[in-house]
Structure formats: structure tokens, C-alpha cells
Image (spheres, rainbow, N blue to C red):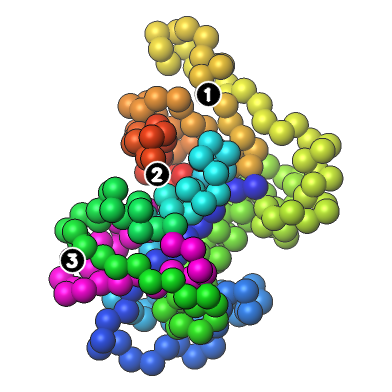
Amino acid sequence: AGPVAVGAFAIGPGDGGMPAGLRDSKLLSERRREAVLPAVQQWGVARSVGLASAIEIDRIGIVASLALAAHRALVAIAPQLAGASAPVVLLDGSHDWLAPVLRERPLPGVPRIGVTTRVKADRDCASVAAASVLAKVHRDRLMIDADAREPGYGWAGNKGYGAATHFAAIAELDHDRPAPDDPELDGGEDTQARRRVRRSTGVYVYRRDGRECLRCGSIIAAADFHGRRLFWCPGCQT
């Protein structure tokens, strides 16, 4: 349940040593991740977390959603990368799912950016470890908030992952439900089939742009991504 989160963390040649206690987020307890986060937020040139919602994951798959979330994270720090002579993204893992997206949709002000993959980069490289901590803490906090809105799934503890208690709750509780009637939408016509809210996100998504998000009131935006029409709430970041 919940979104996929990708952290982007930029360092330059003038940045000093890494924050004490920084490790791959998977090697840190939740308490230690929270403890090291302030130092991570003060280190480096720029940092951001990009998200792709559960609805987007269902629609385009997890790999494309990772690329979508990573692209959103990089767009957020693009102004800080614009002056770099040869910026390079160090991508954790062996599969480069990011470069095709960057070729198709270059970052604003950063027409050329390299991508290098490295297995266990989040364990061996401080900047990737910092990105992993940023993404993990951000997503965990989202799931804790979601648990308060939609109790019963245990998201505060399982964070939306495949724990046995989570699967049991999904089997017991309603998976998704129609969004409330909104007579102002589309001139009063019935739009139940056009929009639904998933309990895994708690966010209403309209099937077209230019409408308000029912959760935060922001105007829903739309973009074409790998031949698919995706919808994005800038306020909810999903």
C-alpha cells in the first residue's frame, strides 16, 4: 500500500565528510533513521523525494513508477544541478531504468546528465545512503499519517509492506470505494465511475486534469509518460 518513494541527493566536490551514523536506510532502525535525518538535511547541495502513487503503480507498473518518482525528485533539485559541468546520477542496482526517461524528458536547465548504476550503492556510497534515508523516512511518515486516517491496516507498523497482518486486513476490509458524490463536477452528472479513492493512498484522483483534489484542493495536473496519461496532485505529491 502507499506510494513508491525515490530520494535524490546531490553532493559536490566541496562537500565535507558524511554525517556521523549515516548508513543504508535498510541497515538503520526507524529511530536511528529519524536521528540522522537532520544531519542529512544539512549536508550536500540539494535533496528531494519523489513519489509515484499506488494508483500509478497499478496503472504503469513498479519499474515505470520508480522512474516517474525519480524524475519528479530530480526535477525538484534541477535548479541546483544547472551549474554543474557534468552531473551524474549514481543509481542503486544493476538496471538503468532512469536514463530512458531522462532522454525523453530532460531536466529543466540540465540538458545532459549521465546515469551510472552500482550494485549496493546505498550501502557503499554516502550520497546514495542519504537519498535512501530521505525516501524511507518520508514514506514511513506518510504511511503513519495514512494509518491515522484509515485505521485497521496497521500501516503505522507495517508501512504498507506485505506483512501477514496487512494481508489479513486487506482480505477483511473493503479494498476500495467510490468517491463521494460531487454535483459540481461535470455539471452535476454522475461521476462515480470516473474517480475512485483507494484506501492504500487516501487520495482522490480525477480521470482528467483541471479539477480540484478533494483532499487538499490543489488543481490536478496531467502529463503524458511513456504513452500513458498520468494525473498528479502537486499538493499531496501523489
Q: Residue placed at 79% from the left, 35% from the top?
A: 173
Q: Name the residue carrying label 2.
A: 235
Find out whether residue 175 is within the magenta segment. no
**Which numbered dot is residue 195?**
1
- Whether tag 2 and tag 3 are in contact, CB under 8 A, the answer is no
Q: Nearer the viewer, residue 44 or 145?
A: 44
Q: Is residue 110 above or below residue 25?
A: above
Q: Amino acid at mark 3?
A: Ala
Q: CA distance from mark 2 to mark 3?
A: 25 Å
Between discs 2 and 1, the one toward the N terminus: 1
**Residue 10 numbered tag:** none
117 w.r.t. 233: above or below: below
For badge 2, the amino acid type reads Gly
Q: What is the spatial separation of the Cα atoms under label 3 and label 1, in whole angstroms?
A: 38 Å
Q: Earlier in the sequence, mark 3 or mark 1?
A: 3
The stretch of residues the image draws in magenta is: 72-96
Q: Is residue 89 visible?
A: yes
